[in-house]
Amino acid sequence: MLIVRTPVRVSFCGGGTDLPAFYKNSDEGGLVTSMALDAYIYVTVNKRFDNAVRVSYSQTENVDDFENLQHELVREAMRLTGVTSGIEITTIADIPGQGTGLGSSSSVTVGLLHALHVYAGRKVTAQQLAEEACHIEIEVLGQPIGKQDQYAAAFGGLNQIRFNSDESVDVISLDSSASSSLGENFCLVWTGLTRKASSILEQQSRNTASKMQQLEAMRTQAEQVSGLIESGDFSAIGELLGNTWELKRTLADGISNPEIDTLYDQLMELGCTGGKLLGAGGGGFILVQTPPNVQQEIATNLANKLIPLNPDFHGSTLLLNEQGE
């Protein structure tokens, strides 16, 4: 039995600039400032007595041939690592599995690859895990997503992530003495809505040529927010999040809706300085900056689930490896 724990992520600014339609056509490439969150996807792998494959997630699959698995991420991770028979795999999440805006699908992919490589006796780096997860999700499965989620999940921490036109990616760790205070000054508020990101991201990618000015501004905001995180200027971050939300809403239809707009307005009325919906849009979590006592006001006045913004600094981590014992 082995267990791997992989964080989900929160993107402060720059989302959308990690799509190839942008970073391949921008002189400075793409840039996202993000943070791994202390909410996790757990992947377990255990050897079976026979050569069949059992996969348990929101449903359970039992197959004799891994090619028959309906869970695409598991199937392709098994193919890439060469671990294709005689195992049982389970995935367990601290948060809803899809439609949260926290990059959970990529965290699943990174965690699967990590666990299966270890099962096969191999050591892997965060860089390798992120690159292989991007390969599976974007190149093999053709998902219309960017690259930020895979790198945030694999590396952990508070980072600037740069996406270069030659497809290379640079992860630059941010040094912030204020990171221990993030949970008191920011939180995630659950909208109660879930959505599939693919249709919004496909439209956003198609719109990129006509939205380059907005995306360039969002890339600049990713630079600005990095400095504000390092200096601990939380209220300025809140205002910047509000500005990036206004830009983000213009990139594609369906990013916001009346329910999200109403909840956002309520959060501002309760004292938040600013915020933005995470992920592609249409549902999931709203990230908000919360001055003192505002999180308590949200908890008292709204029924929506609230999660303080506490960072993970470990990235994808092997928690248990008891093979052969």
Image: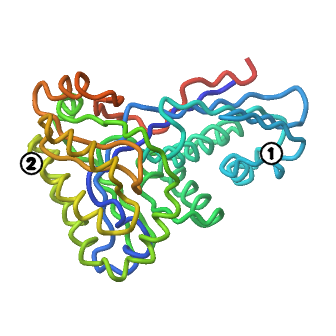
Q: In this view, does 130 lie above or below 321?
A: below
Identify the amino acid type marked 2. Ala
Extreme residue toward the top, this view: 325
Mark 2 Cα shell of 10 Å, populated few (<14), some (14-19), many (≥20): some
Number of the label disc, if any, that sits on residue 236: 2
Residue sitting nearer the eye, 314 or 204: 204
Decide if residue 306 is in sight here: yes
The quadrant in which residue 193 appears is top left
Mark 1 Cα shell of 10 Å, populated few (<14), some (14-19), many (≥20): some
Residue drawn at 63 percent across, 25 percent down: 321
**From the viewer's perspective, is 104 left or right of 321?**
left
Percent position of residue 161, x then y: 33, 57
Point out the image quarter for the N terminus: top right
Label 2 and label 1: CA atoms lie apart by 50 Å
Is the C-beta separation of discs 2 and 1 under 8 Å? no
The quadrant in which residue 302 appears is top left
Say whether disc 2 or disc 1 marks the residue closer to the N-terminus: 1
Number of the label disc, if any, that sits on residue 84: 1
Which label lies toward us, 2 or 1?
2
Percent position of residue 17, x then y: 34, 67
Residue drawn at 16 percent across, 46 percent down: 274
Identify the amino acid type marked 1. Thr
